[in-house]
Amino acid sequence: MTASVIPELAIAIANYRDSADAAAIVALLDAYARDPMGGGTPLCDDVRERLVSALAEQPGAFTLIARAKGEPAGLANCFTGFSTFAARPLVNIHDITVLPQYRGKGVGRALLNAVAQEAQTRGACKITLEVLSGNEPAIAAYRQAGFVQYGLDPAMGTAQFWERKLP
């Protein structure tokens, strides 16, 4: 794991059945949701109540929690998927966030490295993530960590992330 400027930084896979880990996941994700890059709206009570048990029910889901001196500082919610072109698993980082007071101190880099280590343990061929085009600090961090925009043929451009919300 890359050295951090935060002493006593520890990153571990969350135990969804542990009350301290569950509370950290909800608090960190709610802080992310309230941030402009997370939409600027807190998690609704229903989501806060169901989040961790729903994560526990998802095959291949895992969450890494970064703690600085024992206090939650950041998280990465990840899901194992499958690359048909490589016929191997892949890991998607669905959420990655660092609390404002810990940003720029190596926590995000350490989380990305920990995800890479776990992805290798799971035999994954790659790690995927999405990022808002205006989130320049995150884009710079991802580039520094070795991420690139996805594309198969330069003439066809890079991939775009789209969504269709369902009721």
Image (cartoon, rainbow, N blue to C red):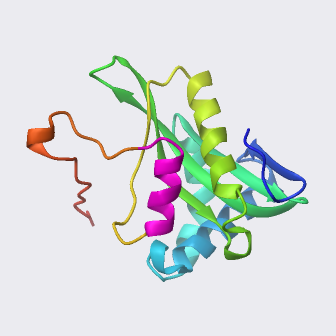
Main SS of the magenta part reads helix
From the top left corner, tell me how far across and down residue 34 is, in percent. Answer: 55, 80
Task: Look at the image and tell me in which quarter the C terminus lies.
Answer: bottom left
Based on the displayed image, in which of its 4 quarters is residue 133 positioned? Answer: bottom left
Give me the residue at 70% from left, 57% from top. Answer: 107
Give whichever of 80, 68 is nearer the camera. 68
Extreme top residue here? 87
In this view, 99 is above or below 126: below
Specify the segment rendered in magenta.
136-147
Could you say which quadrant of the image residue 99 lies in? bottom right
| Left or right: 10, with 50 as reference point | right
| In this picture, residue 114 sits left or right of residue 70 | left
Q: Is residue 138 magenta?
A: yes
Q: Is residue 66 visible?
A: yes
**Residue under the point 60% across and 39% down:** 115
User: Does residue 43 appear in the picture of this structure?
Assistant: no
Is 161 situated above or below 72? Answer: above
Question: For residue 67: magenta?
Answer: no
13 lies left or right of 123:
right
* Residue at (70% x, 47% y) in the render: 16
Identify which residue is drawn at 44% across, 77% down.
Answer: 39
Please identify the quadrant where the N terminus is shown: top right
Give the x, y percent position of residue 131: 40, 60
Q: Quadrant of residue 35?
A: bottom right
Q: Give how far across and how far down residue 136 sits, in percent.
A: 44, 68
